[in-house]
Image (cartoon, rainbow, N blue to C red):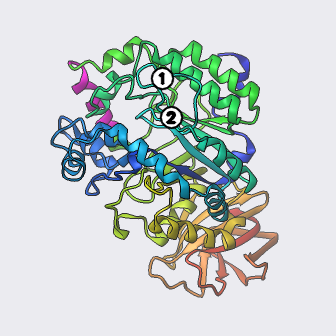
């Protein structure tokens, strides 16, 4: 690894660390049928002891893979709804629905949430590209959008004051390798070889050259060894000096491919089960070079020294799922508290939006949650954006109030909520005052504060907000 990559390893630019919130977009041909089971979580499948748990994955964007398992819920749905219709035909429906797409409206809604960046899936595992790629797919020519959806959204996102990033599925492309993926180990065998590594390299370079993405977000793994991958990273940073890459770039070697052999799969899947049980979900392995971690549908309890980003959908998956009910989505308080929890431990939240494939609209349940985030950002952005973790991420006060901490310079923010729904008139925070301490509400109003044996007794501001933010200047931890 050269000196420049070594300098960047596990480090992110300030704009990324300041952001706290980004928007992910999964919008692919699988968004047309828009179906996946909703009775299981990804973490449960990763710990399941069954031959092909991923055949029941709650991710609708995996629709084509799920079709390869005749007894899967997706196969039953497809037979009942579409008969023998090939998956590839959904791309025609997707393109036909683009007439109503308004990228500027999407960007305005995303910016209103307080998000600082947007990451668009430019090619998911099905291999369909959301831009008119000049890199020819040798197995399915023309498998792309002739309309430049990536470029149009990039322009709209930047015009709304956010940074734009691209997701690319480097690890899978089912036009090159259609091996059914029923488990993590089977997925190792499905990483394409042959002419695919060169194809993927050329496409990512094309994305870099055309769109100069601030984030280069790969998924699963990278189909080539370490040396050519590091050349790709250098190419990217030469063109986007303040860019950032995630952690899903494990180089593919002969050892990794061999681990997908049917005889070794039980061993590999056993290791994955133990890892998922320990982490509570999907935490990718760390490759030789990365800048931030991307746990999926799970978080870290303690402050992390390595930058990280929680990746999750509003429901059980990422792509649009027409069977998801309101109960399948994150509730109001859980969504807001999740953002605060993540910021307190040094992370960002990459919150997914899964638009409909047939008409390019964002479903009402998702719009509702974007509105919740926008309302919260209007009042509370100062306590999150631009902050860093404090010396401790959380506390429960003697009064039973949950508190999460962030910090900016000499200011500590205490973000508080009561599990009972009723905030007491005062709470005891685990801090000590100094001669220059001041305590204020978000609007700058001074709050009464009195030193007590266990900390600082602070009058809570009158508020109907679900999370109350208190600014503590020049305090020290107890």
SS of the residue under disc 2: loop
The mark total stands at: 2
Magenta stretch mostly in which secondary structure?
Answer: helix
Which quadrant of the rendered structure holds the N terminus? Answer: top right
**For the residue carrying disc 1, how many other residues have a C-alpha within 10 Å: few (<14), some (14-19), or many (20+)?**
some
Based on the picture, tell me whether residue 272 belongs to the magenta stretch.
Answer: yes
- Which range of residues does the magenta coloring cover? 263-275
Direction from residue 126 to residue 340 in the image, left or right: right
The single residue placed furthest to the right in the displayed view is 436
Against 117, is 425 above or below? below
Q: Which residue is mark 2?
A: 144
Q: Which residue is mark 1?
A: 137
Name the one closer to the observer, 213 or 186. Answer: 213
Which quadrant of the rendered structure holds the C terminus? Answer: bottom right
Name the one closer to the observer, 356 or 397. Answer: 356
Direction from residue 252 to residue 463 in the image, left or right: right
Q: Earlier in the sequence, mark 2 or mark 1?
A: 1
Against 40, is 57 above or below? above
**For the residue carrying disc 2, how many other residues have a C-alpha within 10 Å: few (<14), some (14-19), or many (20+)?**
many
Residue 55: name its quadrant. top left
x, y percent for residue 422: 50, 85
Asked if the residue at tag 1 contacts the one at tag 2, i.e. Cβ–Cβ closer than 8 Å, the answer is yes
Against 246, is 26 above or below? below
x, y percent for residue 454: 60, 72
x, y percent for residue 439: 75, 76
Based on the picture, tell me whether residue 157 belongs to the magenta stretch.
Answer: no
């Amino acid at each position: 690894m050269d000196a420049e990559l070594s300098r960047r390893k596990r480090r992110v630019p300030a704009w990324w660390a300041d952001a706290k919130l980004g928007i992910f977009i999964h919008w692919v041909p699988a968004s047309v049928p828009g179906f996946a089971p909703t009775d299981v979580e990804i973490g449960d499948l990763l710990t399941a002891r069954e031959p092909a748990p991923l055949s029941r994955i709650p991710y609708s964007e995996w629709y084509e893979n799920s079709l390869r398992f005749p007894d899967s819920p997706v196969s039953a749905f497809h037979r009942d709804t579409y008969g023998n219709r090939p998956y590839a035909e959904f791309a025609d429906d997707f393109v036909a629905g683009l007439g109503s797409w308004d990228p500027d409206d999407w960007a305005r809604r995303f910016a209103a949430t307080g998000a600082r960046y947007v990451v668009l899936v430019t090619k998911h595992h099905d291999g369909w590209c959301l831009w008119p790629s000049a890199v020819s797919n040798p197995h399915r020519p023309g498998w792309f959008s002739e309309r430049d959806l990536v470029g149009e959204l990039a322009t709209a996102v930047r015009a709304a004051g956010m940074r734009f990033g691209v997701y690319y599925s480097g690890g899978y492309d089912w036009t090159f390798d259609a091996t059914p993926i029923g488990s993590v180990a089977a997925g190792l065998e499905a990483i394409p070889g042959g002419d695919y590594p060169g194809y993927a390299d050329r496409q990512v370079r094309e994305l870099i050259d055309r769109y100069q993405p601030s984030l280069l977000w790969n998924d699963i793994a990278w189909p080539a060894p370490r040396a050519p991958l590091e050349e790709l990273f250098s190419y990217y940073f030469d063109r986007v000096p303040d860019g950032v890459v995630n952690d899903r770039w494990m180089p593919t070697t002969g050892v990794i491919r061999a681990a997908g052999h049917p005889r070794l799969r039980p061993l590999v899947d056993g290791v994955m089960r133990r890892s998922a049980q320990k982490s509570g979900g999907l935490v990718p392995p760390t490759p030789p070079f990365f800048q931030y971690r991307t746990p999926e549908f799970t978080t870290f309890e303690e402050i992390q020294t390595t930058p990280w980003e929680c990746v999750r959908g509003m429901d059980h998956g990422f792509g649009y799922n027409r069977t998801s009910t309101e109960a399948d989505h994150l509730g109001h308080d859980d969504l807001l508290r999740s953002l605060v929890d993540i910021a307190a431990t040094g992370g960002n939240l990459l919150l997914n939006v899964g638009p409909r494939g047939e008409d390019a609209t964002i479903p009402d349940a998702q719009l509702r949650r974007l509105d919740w985030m926008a309302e919260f950002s209007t009042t509370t952005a100062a306590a999150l954006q631009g902050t860093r973790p404090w010396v401790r991420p959380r506390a429960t006060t003697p009064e039973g109030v949950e508190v999460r901490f962030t910090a900016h310079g000499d200011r500590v923010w205490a973000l508080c909520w009561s599990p009972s729904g009723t905030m007491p008139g005062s709470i005891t925070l685990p801090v000590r005052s100094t001669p220059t301490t001041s305590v204020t509400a978000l609007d700058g109003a001074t709050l009464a504060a009195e030193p007590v044996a266990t900390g600082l007794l602070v009058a809570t501001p009158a508020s109907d907000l679900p999370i109350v933010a208190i600014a503590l200047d020049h305090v020290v931890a107890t």
